[in-house]
Image (cartoon, rainbow, N blue to C red):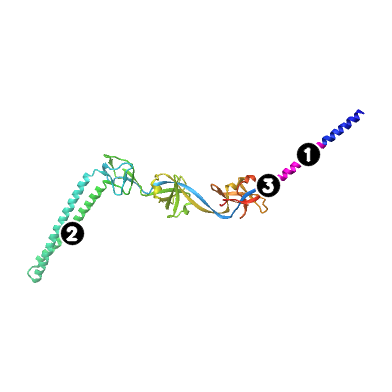
Amino acid sequence: MRARVLRRHLGRELGRRWWQWAVLLGWVLTLQVVALAWAKQAHAQTTVPYFKIQAQDSYASARRYAGVTAPARSAQLGFKRSGEVAQVLVDQGASVAKGQALAHLDAAGLRAELQQADANVAHAAANLNAHRAAAQLAMNTEQRMRKLRASGHASKQTYDEVFLDLQAKAAQVEVAKANKLRAEAAQQAARVALEEAAIIAPFEGVVQARYLDEGSQVQPGPAVLKVIETGAVEAQVGVPSAVAPKLQPGTRHTLYSNGAQLVGRLTTVLPEVDRNTRTVNAIFTLEDASPRSRLTLGAVVELEFTEQVASPGFWLPMSALTAADRGLWSVYVINPDDIIERRLLEIVHSEADRVFARGTLSDADRVVHTGVQRVVPGQAVVPVPALQARL
């Protein structure tokens, strides 16, 4: 009897517990259905900014190539004659004008030689004048004797003597002329020698170096001063040999130095490849006077050169990219049904805030512009045109 009552009590207790568990399970299933419905509704109402891509046949690639500034002209100046240095009139950093005397040799001997040459020229000129006078007298005598010979008042012997004297006097004039020319040549050589005893600035510039002082004995050739031109500054930029043919002499290009923008006219592109840098030197004449006046010679400059590269693809903002496997990248595209799809890309060229890529894209595809972390493939979205999505 007790066993039957116990079994009946146990059955009622199990039935009551089962009903509680069934109610609890029903609430859980209801909550899951509601959560799924809310999630689906949330996904369906996610707004996504997009932009339409445009297919391109090529892209502009801007590169910068480094170089240095240099004077348009520089000269190592020395004496053309040997001797003792008497004066060095300038020091390092001194500004010089074209034609200015910079240094002198001791030229006392050269000045004496010039004086002697002047005297020789004067002597030769006087001697020439004397022979010309004698020749003129001989000519007059010959003319009178010719008339007397014609009238029979002079013998043939007498006339021949007068005629030959005229010929001798004329020859002496020619010798005197030659002596005068030789004396003048010696005089000019003495003047040149005296000029070569001085160093003259070949152009306007600044003394970069001074190698010798007064009292030094010099031979022809070794440098005494180095002068660099300040009126014009060049930029020597190394560019790859593949880029060199695209640079045309006479064209203007943009260069940069210490944040300053310069304009340079391409003078020439040297034909030889540098063995160390494997580049060729492009020479530019800087045209901007204001930045150039503050530009230090030997400063680093950069040439900005933009070239058009033939390659089909699309411009995309960095914000639209997501990483993919095997070194590839991807973007999210909104299909005509407003569903997110993933497309793989290969980046061809990159810049600060955009890339040029090619891949499984088509012209006018709607690409997600920002917020790529909020969407997944297969998600339904509400597309909204992105602001400032121009590329």
The amino acid pointed to by label 1 is Leu
Report whether residue 273 is seen.
no
Which amino acid, by three-letter code, is at mark 2? Answer: Glu
| Residue at (15% x, 60% y) in the render | 132
Q: Residues within 10 Å of mark 2 (few under 14, many from 20)?
A: some
Please name the amino acid that badge 3 sits on. His
Query: In terms of secondary structure, what is the magenta stretch mainly?
Result: helix
Identify the mark nearer the N-term, 2 or 1. Answer: 1
Local SS, label 1: helix
Q: Is residue 263 left or right of residue 8?
A: left
**Residue visible at 88% across and 30% down?**
6
Q: Is residue 82 left or right of residue 7?
A: left
> Can you tell which mark lies on residue 25?
1
Q: What label does residue 174 carry, if any?
A: 2
| Residue beneath the point at 11% across and 65% down | 142
| Residue hosting label 3 | 43
Magenta residues?
19-46
Q: Depth check: 309 or 224 in front?
A: 309
